[in-house]
Amino acid sequence: MYDFAPLIDSITSYLNTNFSPFWAGLLAMVMLGLVLLLIYAVLGLYLVYAERKICARMQNRMGPNRVGPMGLFQTIADLIKLLLKELIFIRNADNFLFNIAPFIVIVASIMAIGSIPFGKGLQAIDLNIGVLYILAISSMGVIGILIAGWASNSKYSVIGAMRSGAQVISYELSVGLALLCIITYAGTMQFSEIIASQQNGWWIFKGHLPAMIAFAVYLVAGTAETNRGPFDLAEAESELTAGFHTEYSGIKFAFFFLAEYMNMFIIAAVATTLFLGGWLPFHLFQWQGFNQVMDFIPPVFWFFGKTAFVIYLMMWFKWTFPRLRIDQLLALEWKYLLPINLMNLILISFLTLMQWHF
Amino acid sequence: MEETLMDIELKEKEEYIINMGPQHPSTHGVLRFELCLLGEQVKYVIPHCGYIHRGIEKMCEHLTYPQLVHLTDRMDYLSAHINNEAVALCVEKSMNVEVSDRVKYIRTILSELTRIASHQLWWSAFGMDLGALTTFFYGLRDREKILDIFEESTGSRLTQSFITPGGLMGDVHPNFQKRVAEFIKYFRKKLPEYDQLLTGNVIFRERTKGIGIMSKEDAIDYGVTGPSGRGSGFHCDIRKIEPYSAYPFVEVNEVTLTEGDTYARYLVRIKEMWESLNILEQLVDNVPAGPIMLELKAIKAPKGEYYQRVETARGELGVYIVSDGGPSPARMKFRSPNFSNLFIINKLAAGHKIADLVAISGSLDLVIPDIDR
């Protein structure tokens, strides 16, 4: 049920029969690009809206409620405002780097979206090294941040960029190792196969305690990698005003803003795929009726539901915790998360070797 | 060796100096810190003040005593009542008159409410300085209740100018006592939430414990008073040392801690809120009847010099009046707590990280208009 593969196959065969291979490939790419960009923009806007609503709930406020029903069009209005704003050019700044930085950040997150499985067969490209690809692409964003801080020719921005660089590079390690745990269990890096391996139980449940530890570590490290609170040192509003994007205005600022939210989505989507069974429905042993009802809910809803849950957790962190200091942040990674992770990996390798997972 | 001009220029080239302020979210106003950084580390901090100097002390020389009370609201706008009270007490002292017990009680209730409101706003902003944005809304939610009480009785929410030499501007609203009693009950329930949200947080404790340690000697040397000084074990509560208004009638417990770090200064303020609630509880049901204004021919200090100090939410506020017997003072001087509290910042923050500087300046609870006056 709800398999998107036939739909995509029929589109591909239509293109292949009616166009020459070159044009068919080009058209397919353009269509895919447009769809992904659309998903990207809509998701980004509504993540901002969700964050504003959720933090409002946590702070005894209403949140946006004027533009459209329940303020649903508020972020669209904000986007239009940002599009119309003046782009400020700074004297003495390195203009080429200054202009290219937001694009690097946003392109990195758009490329990562391509390999995320939204549903059965609903995936732009199913790479056999999907996890590695996501890790590689999403860590490219930090180059953009470093360039932005450096090219702004502002002292605050440089401090923000340097913090961000140190942070992302260290936490990348934990993210990778936490994902490696599940790769060890599943024995593959391909997203579709990882999901297939969770057919009779999600990894967070059937991976025993180590999988849960890996999930917790991944969540912490993932939050840190996206530069979100309580790890938002790169921005650190009360210390560096806005850190690396202090000097940006208009749509360039919006790019940084959107990329931050989409990186959060990517982190949550990867967590969903690897730990929470991706688009697979929730099943209980023996409960046939319950399982059938669960099957009836389309996979896309399952995927977005689980991702929304992980995103909610990350927003919860942000709105209740104070910010860490830079040395505490690095100590947390190198002294706690990394050793825990390595031990965990050894444990998981042992479990996998003995075939002790379900 | 003497430092030549070229040496200084060279130093400026070598050192990484940034300006924190005058427009910066964590200086809470127009204060400028000149920071010299060594990577993330702060080498030294030079506070520059004077951005909102209005010459209040000079302006006072041209106003009559009841008029100049209105200017004191604009100094430390978060303890407006207490500032008014300081001037009123000083003028009353000079004229050698004593207000009725009713006035004393109401003045003290208003002062303690002001102290709680000020600490609530400080708590909110301190959380924000550390990156916990939600505290701001929790604090303001409860502060609103106090401001409503002020609005009902004094007609104003921030700059009340209600306490005046000789008594009060008017009588309080009939609901006043009832609403204060309701607030005590309400806030007793809400105050533990503050601890749940911030005090118990691991990150918060890590960020504040052992940061910016101020020894008792330093506190005395720099004249750091109020909760900041009491966090270092400096007994400086004027309510206890020189009780004024209705404080002699109630039991006041001075909150002091000896650690002297940012966390101690934080805890002192949280405990002071509990203590203020206790004081309010002792006062609110016992407000006696009586006149609210003394019947005086003219309110003016006789020739001489007079000094009165009170405990504001931030420390010791001293009012010094030099009078030549005229309707307005010949010279007026305020010993404002924030001015003294500010200048210890270099001693506390040097050697720490930028993030710690923000935490330390937050824990000193600076109100900039009071520094510049």
Image (cartoon, rainbow, N blue to C red):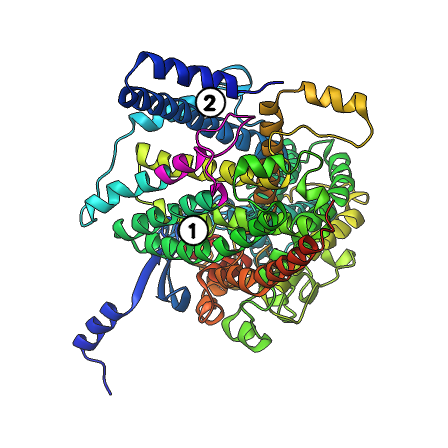
Q: Residues within 10 Å of mark 1 (few under 14, many from 20)?
A: many
Q: Position of residue B319 (x, y in %)?
A: 52, 59
Give the residue type at disc 1: Ala
Give the farthest residue toward the bottom: B1
Q: Is residue A126 magenta?
A: yes
Q: Is residue A288 magenta?
A: no
Q: Position of residue B267 (x, y in %)?
A: 66, 59
Name the quarter where the N terminus of chain B is drawn: bottom left
**The one of A15 and B268 positioned closer to us in this rendering:** A15
Relative to A341, is A256 above or below?
above
Q: Residue at x 74, y 31 (%)?
A: B175
Give the residue type at disc 2: Gln
Relative to B318, is A235 above or below?
above
Q: Is A137 left, or right, of B316 in this rendering?
A: left
How far apart are labels 2 and 1 at the CA level? 26 Å
The reply to whether label 2 and label 1 mark residues of one chain is: yes
Q: Position of residue A274 (x, y in %)?
A: 59, 41
The residue at which mark 1 appears reads as: A234
| Magenta-highlighted residues | A107-131
What subunit carries mark 2? Answer: A
**The one of B49 and B270 positioned closer to us in this rendering:** B270
Q: Which mark is residue B347?
A: none
Which numbered disc, 2 or 1, marks the residue that appears first in the sequence?
A: 2
Magenta span: predominant SS is loop
What subunit carries mark 1? Answer: A
The residue at which mark 2 appears reads as: A74
| Residue B373 visible from this viewpoint | no
The secondary structure type at the circle numbered 2 is helix
Q: Nearer the viewer, mark 2 or mark 1?
A: 1
Relative to A212, is B203 above or below?
below
